[in-house]
Amino acid sequence: MPNLSPITVFLLVALAKTVIALGLLLTSVAYLTWFERKLVGRIQNRWGPSRVGPFGLLQPLADGLKFIFKEDITPPYVNKPLYLAAPLIALALALTSIAVIPFSPPVHLGGLQTALQVTDVNIGLLIILGITSIGLYGIALAGWASNSKYSLLGALRGSAQMVSYEVALGLSLVGVLILARSFSLQEIVTAQHGLRWGWLPNWNILTGCQLVAFLIYICAAFAETNRIPFDLPEAETELVAGYHTEYSSMKFAMFFMAEYANMFTVACLASILFFGGWTGPIFGFGPYSWQAGLLHVFWFALRIFFFLFLYVWIRGTLPRFRYDQLMSFCWKVLLPLSIANILVTALVVALRS
Amino acid sequence: MIHYLLFFIFGALAVAGAVNLLAQKHPIASALSLIVVMGSLAAEYLLLGAEFVAIIQVIVYAGAIMVLFIFVIMLLNAGEEPRAGGSSRVAWMFGFPAMLAIGILLAWVLVKRDAANTSVPVGAMYGSPTLIAEQLFKPYLLPFEVTSVLVLIAIMGAVVLARKED
Amino acid sequence: MVPLGYYLALSAILFACGVAGFLIKRNIITIFMSIELMLNAVNLSFVAFAAHWHVLSGQVFVFFVMVVAAAESAVGLAIIIAVFRTRATLDVDRVDLLKL
Amino acid sequence: MNSTFHLWLIPALPLAGAAINGLFGRSFPRKVVTALALFASGAAFAWAALCALRFAGLAEDAIPHIENYATWFRVGDFSVPFAFQFDQLSLVMILVVTGVGFLIHIYSAGYMAHEGGYYRYFSYLNLFMFFMLTLVLANNYLLMFVGWEGVGLASYLLIGFFFLRDSAASAGKKAFIVNRIGDFGFLIALFLMIQHFGTLTFTEVFDQVSQRPIETAGAGLLTAIGVLLMTGACGKSAQLPLYVWLPDAMEGPTPVSALIHAATMVTAGVYMVARSNPIFFRSPTALTVVAIVGTMTAFFAATIGITQTDIKRVLAYSTISQLGYMFVACGVAAFSAGIFHLMTHAFFKALLFLGAGSVIHALGGEQDMRQMGGLRKRIPWTFWTMTAATLAIAGIPGFSGFFSKDEILWNAYASPWGGHWIYWLMGFLTALMTSFYMFRLLFLTFAGKYRGTLSTNPKHTGGKHGHIHESPKIMTVPLAILAVLAVIGGYIGVPAALGGSNHFEHFLEPIFQAPPLPAGVVEHANHALELPLMACTTGAALLGLFLAWLLYVSSPQLPRRIADRAGSVYRLVLNKYYVDELYQAVLVNPLITGSTKLLWRGIDAGGIDGAIDGSARGAQELSDGVRHMQSGNLRSYAGWIAIGAAAVIIFMIVMGGK
């Protein structure tokens, strides 16, 4: 590619990376649904999807087709523009987060050196937080625009819950930020590179002593993604289906995909922040070869898989919170804990330096 | 050139959002217009090299304050505001025209006077979190702590005000 | 290279819109949003000046403005809820007795 | 040399007594109040006496002995110390003040025994002592002025002691206001000193004064200061034309009249002039003013004294007249003679007042001499002591008044500092009249038959106060002591002409050091004349005694006839030359009218109140108009704000363009 100007190269590479990342993400989301159904089935002592394709592997495809061909109902008395905009907002924002997730350190690829990451921003973590906070509008507007009591209640619950847990979520990350001294996700991962005492991985959760922060993060993140045991905005047994009661067909699918994409982001973030991201043992490759890059991606994928497994596992295990319990858990347990965590971490870092 | 382009795109978006805020009858629509304004302003901040401010603008304004507004609107189930009625004559007759005139006049004067002036350099990110922190926790430590007290008081005030009396 | 004056002009226009909103809107929540608009306009001036003079203080001030805005909106919305509870209206023209 | 006398104790003791009695006395039993007040004044006297004894041991260069306690205040280069000065002059003064004061305190305990406000009386009396002692001990004019004003305050409080009586209240006010006129002059004198000398401390002022020449040709700064000081002295010491308050001051309790309006406070003017002698020495004009005022007052007051019938008023005019004598002495630069007379006068005039008080006490409050008579047998102690005092004041040889008065008259004639035979002549006539009216008082009161209505028989009323009775011991003992002093007090200053050595004058000499006589003035006195002149005054005294005996004992109808014959002259004198009426018409009424019509109705009510009311009314009307802006409508408020902001912005754009 010698005849191309640098800016064109940059644009081409960015485009390629975006397409690949989006494709991967959407595929993952699709198979995450399959994985969830299969695993929950196992937990509940049933088979789960098994008819379409081997082990039901083609089930997501069938679901997608089903969504596309289903009748698209727009109920009367809804606020049409917002009713239509809400799922788009939700999905678009959920997919945006993937852009700053680093899958590997920079690698050489056909004369180019680039990280397997759409873009490395030095405020990457903040961007994810910002996107998460905006993502709330999808739920809120959906519930309100539907002009339905269940939806509205779901939206109200959702807004309050997400705004509250966002505080705990953000504060739980401060400990990690203090250790890494950067907002850049790539740098946060790099900071966790290597071993302590020759055998202990330098992960934040281990040598950084961020176990408490991790637990807070997991709780808050579950709440942010409206997953059991914090799925009150869409609690079937209470609110029919919460904010997306009035949605059907592809619009419903968008909410669905947004939720799973968010789960994926949370899993990525948990790995990056607490479990060393793409770090891992490298067997026999140069530090910047593409094979090493793939191996990094593999280590990263393993961790993501673990967290997704955790999601489903918890879903299959725990009952739902009551709403007042949910709120007081956030404000009275998570928030003080996270502040205490910040204090202790800051103190330790200050004393160590 | 691209900066002019971006400036005008987001500037126009912001002004459109602001005007829409005035034009819309329903508070939800106004709120969404305001979110558009804030988003556009975040983009303008990025143009000005203030990346941290930009993202904080999104998180705090769009992600928290406006959510609060929308939450309240939904909670109170506020509808469209009725047309006309006992509106303030002073506001309509003097304040509104005066303010519009002033806004336009001011804008005109500013553009006129500063067009040839030095301009904002682009590219260098002045507002990195580290630099902001340097400022915030060294020369502005006291104001920072005072604002934290302010926030605490605001929290207590909000709780007291919004609590249902038994 | 966008001149400083353009940013200030944009800020002025947004501010004027905010004031106008304050004057013509009757829904108390919208009025509140107009105030936020004004604050945002001011923030833009701050950031523009900060970039112009290469001084970070302008950006720091934006943070203070944001904190104050957050505090203000928390209390303000609480007041709105309290007013609505007693008066069942959000129309400021009907809340003109200077008392609740 | 630096041994301290703790002079501050002398005024501090009465102050403590005044404070304790004044603050808590209401709840004390009378005995406690009495004990406190007597202790305060008695201890002050004792300490003063002790200081006097130690003073004798002081080296000559240690005089004046100054005790500096603190800097009172400091303004730029000008500072006023809080310091006391102890020299011969202040020694005499504090002994007189504390001694006579102590005796009068004792006397008061008996005299006031049945009056209300007992604690208040003694508190005021102690307060007076405090201020008077501050006055005479001060080492600078300003501290002296504090005492000066303080005694005025105490005097005001005590004159108005029976404040329920309208006349007492207005007499107090009169005294206060008339004194203000004099104080005005005093203050201006102080300002002049500050301006030209930059200090008010006696020693420093006099040092600077002594650098200056004698102002023989025309009036200069020292003349101005001297005349202004004399104005102050006129007010305090009841000289022409400011004497009018003293007769009215007799509204106060009689012991107060004795202490304040006879023995001590009214002599403060004399003390002040004597203290300022370096200034007067260098200003013949001022001396002349002092001498003329003194002569006029002495003569004028004596004529009024002849016709008065109220026993205390006779004594009041007598006091004015005697004060005039003292000023005559000061006016011819015979300051020590003035102070000598001040001291003897303090003894016999206090005694006279106390005796009069005893008479009044005996008669249950009667003060009109026409209602008295024949009391000699009823109240012998009073009679004998008063007789001694009368002999003293009349100048009968051998009694204290003879020596002091004679020295004044001799100096008035012979002093090189402006002595003149006219002063002597006037003094001679005054002495004649003094003798006459004093014996008139004595005869009217004690001789002849009782003309009053009170029962002379104790059995008729059965009560203690319904009949004529001698005063208790507590009152008669001070009378006796004072009588002794009045008789022998003059022997410390027996003039050389009578073979004495005039200790007193020599004692005070260091204070009154005269500068060299101005050129052209010669000693014109012929010492051979001293004895003849003395004989003349003695003759005058005896003549007065004879006339009084003739008119009031031998043929009591005669005075009536003379009065009828004299007619208008008699009425003129009886009515005190209509001076009060004149002041009323010329000064007081225009002042009242002016302040009522012009200041009160015109400027205050019309101008100031009108402006205030007008502005209030204007604000009211303006706000009534603007009130409608306050609609309670949030957005209209915002509209106004927007208009204002717009105006400011437009202004700035327009101005910024220039």
Image (cartoon, coloured by chain):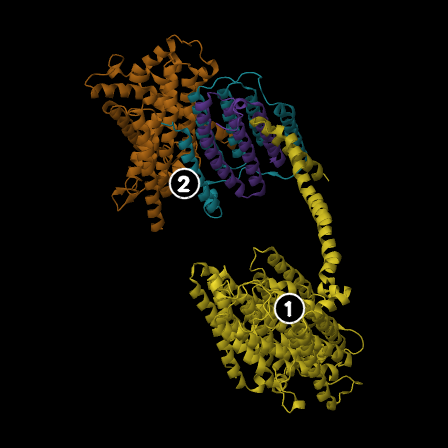
Quadrant (top left/top right/bottom left/bottom right) for the N terminus of chain B: top right
Amino acid type of the residue that numbered disc 1 sits on in the rendered structure: Ala
- Of residues D222 and A83, which is closer to you in this image? D222
Q: Is residue D518 above or below residue D565?
A: below
Residue B28 in view in this figure? yes
The chain letter of the purple chain reads C
Which quadrant of the figure has residue B105?
A: top right
- In the rendered image, what is the letter of the chain coloured orange? A
Q: Position of residue D370 (x, y in %)?
A: 63, 66
Colour of chain D, in one word, is yellow
Residues D554 and D353: in front is: D554
Q: Secondary structure at mark 2?
A: loop
Q: In percent of the image, x 47 and y 13: which residue is there?
A: A80
Residue situated in front as seen by the camera: D615 or C93: D615
Q: Which residue is mark 2?
A: A182
Query: Is D292 left or right of B124, judged from the image as shown?
Result: right
Report which colour depicts chain B. cyan
Q: Position of residue C18 (x, y in %)?
A: 57, 28
Image quadrant holding the C terminus of chain B, namely top left
